Image (cartoon, rainbow, N blue to C red):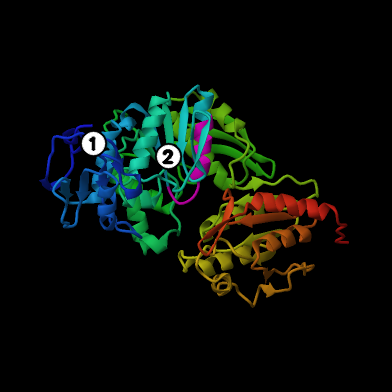
Amino acid sequence: MKIGQLLEGINIVNISGDISGDVSTLCYVSEKCENNSMFVAIAGLKYDGHDYIMDAIARGASFIVHEKDFKFPYHVTAVKVADSRRSLGILAANFFRRPADNLCLTAVVGTNGKTTITYLLESILQSAGCNCGVLGTVNYRFNNKVYPAPNTTPESYEMQRILREMADGGVTHVIAEVSSHAIDLRRVDDCSFDLGIFTNLTRDHLDYHKTMENYYQAKKRFFSEVLPSAKKTAAEKTLINADDEAGRRMIQELAQPAITYGLENQSAIMATEYNLSLAGIQATIGARGENIGISSPLIGKYNLYNILAAAGAARLLKIPADKIKAGIERLFNVPGRLERVKTDSGFFVFVDYAHTDDALKNVLQNLAALKKNKIITVFGCGGDRDHGKRPLMGAVATALSDYSIVTSDNPRSEDPLFIIGEIEKGIDSGIVKKVDGMERNAANTRCYTVIPDRKKAIETAIALAAPGDIVLIAGKGHEDYQILGNIRMPFDDRAVAEAALKLRSKKKIDFN
């Protein structure tokens, strides 16, 4: 591509060198540079791309985009810009010929529920005959191909590249989980979205955002700046959960009107009646003049909210009611989102991604409303992340579970015992008794134990379970690894639970 075409829309401070050449590839990682590449030097969160400029040139890069002063070799074309990160998004959109312009692109924004909503909406759109692509926490997928997801929302270059592959591959509709990091770091600013869904706002990512207000403003920015800038013609682009406090605030603060969904406050998309059980959700959804009766194997009130969001989005995308019903009912589970682990032992085992106090509270409250006996919860907190949520997680888990096992999550560079100690600070020792690992509480008193080894913690929970119990393994969900130090070890809660169930079946467990 001609450099002039590539630089359209860039806030250029200065250019030196030949500006008539062709750019072969666009890179922001020096190792990927080749002859006539354009390298964009970004000052990142961990590394500064300006430190790798000479490496990029040594690998053949002829064009360098930078924001810091640098002495370049004579043969290099240097483009100084006001903001390298922002420039990368524009350059990528130009390089890949703005693929979002030719796709129906939906964003799902919020703390909880994003992944489930993408799966639901994907199922609905597929029922309507649409060719779907999805970008999310679990994976990136389209045309029966699945790719690992290093980030919930890709970096702007990868975002544009994948969207171009989707468009060229015949994809018509794309659903993207859009994280607060991605919004704050301008990864999606140059994507033309048709629709944005806001689910809720609860404590998360404060290691990055520092305050809840900053976190809220990052989410809001998608709806106040990114979504309105899209050159799409639909008048109704915003769908917001009216039962969420931040959602109601956003409705008041946004310039454009929003379509609402909810269960408690009058909304355009509502469940007029519903029944929740461990078998699933039965509901009638009132969707702007049409009633849609659905039966879903998903569990819990919060999943009813996710169904309302997906159904509302589908209505805004002009999907017929019968296709909405079919799509919702054909989705049997979402990886790591209250995902059942099959057992014939008379109790239930679920794996869930809940890794914040609010998400864990939602899951446990929903399970508590459905339980027949006791809830046994296995959970921990990730290392090198928000320390403030650790005691909150401890308080929630032990308040809403009959028996809690505090264990490791992804400790990363931190000592697992230190993390567990911070979790224990939130546990009310006057109400919740600390016990040895295999001591099941016979009385109706809550208790907890500490088992740092996650595998042993899961095995203990399943060994302790009695008929009618619910075992919840929380925090990692779909993840198939555990990060210890700098090492990513294979570890899947679902596989470990299945193995523990087989081990249990070889032993006789008697709770009489």
Comes first in the chain, label 1 or label 2? 1
Picture quarter with the N terminus: top left
The residue that disc 1 covers is 23
Q: Is residue 125 left or right of residue 403?
A: left
Res 256 seen here: no
Picture quarter with the C terminus: bottom right
Res 44 seen here: yes
Kind of residue indicated by mark 2:
Ala
Q: Residues within 10 Å of mark 1 (few under 14, many from 20)?
A: many
Secondary structure of the residue carrying tag 2 is strand
Q: Is residue 345 left or right of residue 202?
A: right
Q: Which residues are magenta?
A: 110-123
Spatial separation of the CA atoms under disc 1 and disc 2 = 29 Å
Which of these two is toward me, 335 or 12?
12
Q: Is residue 16 above or below residue 381?
A: above
Tag of residue 272: none
Q: Quadrant of residue 27?
A: top left
Secondary structure of the residue carrying tag 1 is loop
Instruction: Decide whether the magenta segment is chiefly helix, strand or loop.
Output: helix
Q: Position of residue 304 (x, y in %)?
A: 56, 42
**Which residue is found at the position 43% from the left and 53% from the top?**
201
Kind of residue indicated by mark 1:
Val
Q: Position of residue 43 (x, y in %)?
A: 28, 56
Tag of residue 176: 2
